[in-house]
Structures are given as C-alpha cells and as structure tokens.
Image (spheres, rainbow, N blue to C red):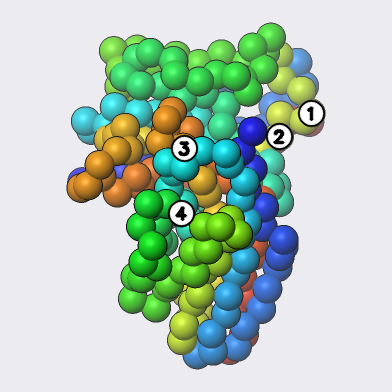
Amino acid sequence: AQTVTQSQPEMSVQEAETVTLSCTYDTSESDYYLFWYKQPPSRQMILVIRQEAYKQQNATENRFSVNFQKAAKSFSLKISDSQLGDAAMYFCALLMNRDDKIIFGKGTRLHILP
Amino acid sequence: EAGVAQSPRYKIIEKRQSVAFWCNPISGHATLYWYQQILGQGPKLLIQFQNNGVVDDSQLPKDRFSAERLKGVDSTLKIQPAKLEDSAVYLCASSSEPFRGEGHTGELFFGEGSRLTVL
C-alpha cells in the first residue's frame, strides 16, 4: 500500500525567510507523481507544485521549489522569501499513474510571523 | 472558467439523520472525487468517478454512504444515517485527466467543501 508521511504538524517562519516542509512516501511502483497542495484557512485547496517521478530535475515555481530524492522517497518543499499569504495547511500528495488514485499526507500547518 | 461548486457550505444535523451534498465539477472534467477531511487530517478519498462510472469506492462506508454521478456531470454524496464520527469537511474535486503524458498537469481542482457537524 502507498503511504505519505508529513512529520511536521506545524511550523513557523519569519516573513521573508526560507522554510522547508518535509514529506516522505512509500510505494513499490515506479510510475507516479508527487504534489504539494496548499489549503488556506477556510479556502479551497490549490496546487502549489508538481513533480514527475521519472524526471530527475527538481520542479520550481517562482518562490516554491522541491527537493526530490527518489531513492530516499523524500519530497520536501522549500518556500523562499516567505510571505504572509503563504500561511496555510500544506499537503504532500502521491498520485499513482496506474489508477489515478491520489493519497494525501496529514498536512503541515505553516505560520508566517510578521 | 467557473470552478468546482459545492453545496451546502455548512450543515448541522443530529445523529441518525440524513444529509446530501452536491458537487458540480468544472465543465468537461471527466474525473470527479469525493474526499472526507476530518479536522487536523489530510483528505481521505471516499469515491472516484470516471465520467459516470465508479473507479474506486474501496474506502466508502457503503452501509451509510452512497454517491452517484448522473450523466457524468454533477454528483451527490449522501449519508444516511449519520454518525458523530462523520463530522468533517466533504471535499469535491475534479480533473480533466487521466494524468498521463506531457501536457497533463495532474492538477485536481477543489471546491470550497461542505462542512458537516453531527450532534
């Protein structure tokens, strides 16, 4: 069975600083995708960044980047120049290409300190 | 482009009552998901539709939960009878996929959710 683990229930970072959210996953399959989703308070979940397992290059989207370590099954999210609007729950998710099933971690609540 | 619409946003019922949630996905999206998100936890997949067919309902408590997607568009999720542990946010999401190949982002588009409180 596939699992996604986020070991940091909450984190805080000073505005304009950099923060890294951790995620590990487990699957025996080789064809999958990894995602980070953001869920602001009382607002809908949106996609932050996506990584295909077959790509070695780490994905980057503006201030957001990932460190994808396939052998270690690790997929961390780095947020640079943190902004107040980054405060949210962040979910790591694993998509199996075989059946389009997506599994979410339990989330990390990120606080931005002004 | 209109997003995923869900209603009602909030619902309070007593245990053993029934409730229904409605979802209208983004136009043209073939895949529709219902997730249950208990406070402090990540979303848990309840059921996944591809057009109007069920792809996965392995985690749907079928003795009390049911879902349908008529004509491959709108979907309803029903709980009857509700239990205290059903208190959660019910999220609907849609995608245009299957997620395969270049050009597909794999992105799920979520609605704002329906918050259920069972007393």
The answer to whether the residue labelled 1 contacts the one labelled 2, judged by CB atoms less than 8 Å apart, is yes
Respond whether the residues carrying marks 4 and 1 are from the same subunit.
Answer: no
Q: Position of residue B52 (x, y in %)?
A: 34, 14
Which quadrant of the structure image shows residue B62?
A: top right
Q: Residue at x 60, y 19 (%)?
A: B58
Respond whether the residues carrying marks 2 and 3 are from the same subunit.
Answer: no
Instruction: State the separation of the CA atoms marked 1 and 2.
Output: 6 Å
Tell me which chain the residue with mark 4 is part of: A
**Furthest-front residue in view?**
A71
Figure label count: 4
Tell us which disc is closer to us: 3 or 4: 3
Amino acid type of disc 3? Answer: Met
Instruction: State the separation of the CA atoms marked 4 and 2.
Output: 27 Å
The foreground one among B5 and A17 is A17
Amino acid type of disc 2? Answer: Ser
The foreground one among B8 and A11 is A11
Residue A96, disc? 3
Tell us which disc is closer to us: 2 or 3: 3
Residue B87, disc? 2
Q: Which residue is mark 4?
A: A35
Tell us which disc is closer to us: 3 or 1: 3
The foreground one among B21 and B33 is B33
The image shows residue A63, relative to residue A29, as above or below, that is below
Q: Quadrant of the N terminus of chain A?
A: top right
The image shows residue A97, relative to residue B65, as above or below, that is below
Instruction: State the separation of the CA atoms marked 3 and 4.
Output: 11 Å
Residue B84, disc? 1
